[in-house]
Amino acid sequence: QVQLVESGGGLVQPGGSLRLSCAASGSISGIIAMGWYRQAPGKQREFVAGIISGAYTNYADSVKGRFTISRDNAKNTVYLQMNSLKPEDTAVYYCTWGQYWGQGTQVTVSS
């Protein structure tokens, strides 16, 4: 079993930044793919960013150039640095480690 604890969400003004963290514990050895998804009210959950083997990354077109996913192996933590935030980035953000999902953290972009 894997436990994921997310943090870093909150309220930010348009143009601002937030960094989400996802700390993993439990049976995480062998898991090489991590990611972030989001779900806005009334919309389907969508892919945001992914990282494989701590090095290979990919992003949704809507966040390319603004968001950066990274991994700290020593801390078993995955991060999502979000810059130049827009109101349309408002959503609950979920991290994934392999097949496991975090509980979600709310990000609200509003003036």
Image (spheres, grey):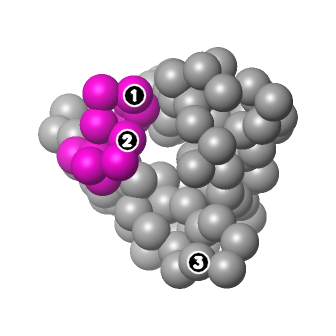
x, y (%) of residue 28? Answer: 47, 56
Q: What residue would you read off at disc 2?
A: 63
Residue 32 percent location from the top left of the image: 29, 53
State the image quarter where residue 41 is shown: bottom right
In this image, 95 relative to 12: left or right? left
- Image coordinates for residue 46, horizontal then vertical, percent: 45, 68
3 or 1: tag closer to the N-terminus: 3
In the displayed structure, 86 sits above or below 104; it is: above
How far is the residue under mark 1 from the one under mark 2? 5 Å
The residue positioned farthest toward the front in the image shown: 111
**Would you say 30 lies left or right of 10 here?**
left
Q: Quadrant of the C terminus?
A: top right
Q: Determine whether label 1 and label 2 are within 8 Å by CB.
A: yes
Please report contact status of discs 3 and 1: CB closer than 8 Å, yes or no: no
Compare residues 36 and 82 and report the one nearer the observer: 82
Per the image, label 3 sits on a secondary structure element best described as loop
Which residue lies most toward the left here? 56
Q: Position of residue 96 (x, y in %)?
A: 49, 61
Residue 88 visible here: yes
- Magenta segment range? 58-71
- Label 1: which residue? 66
> So how many labels did they put on this image?
3
SS label for mark 2: loop
- Residue identified by numbered label 3: 43
The amino acid at mark 3 is Lys
Say if residue 9 shows up in the picture. Answer: no
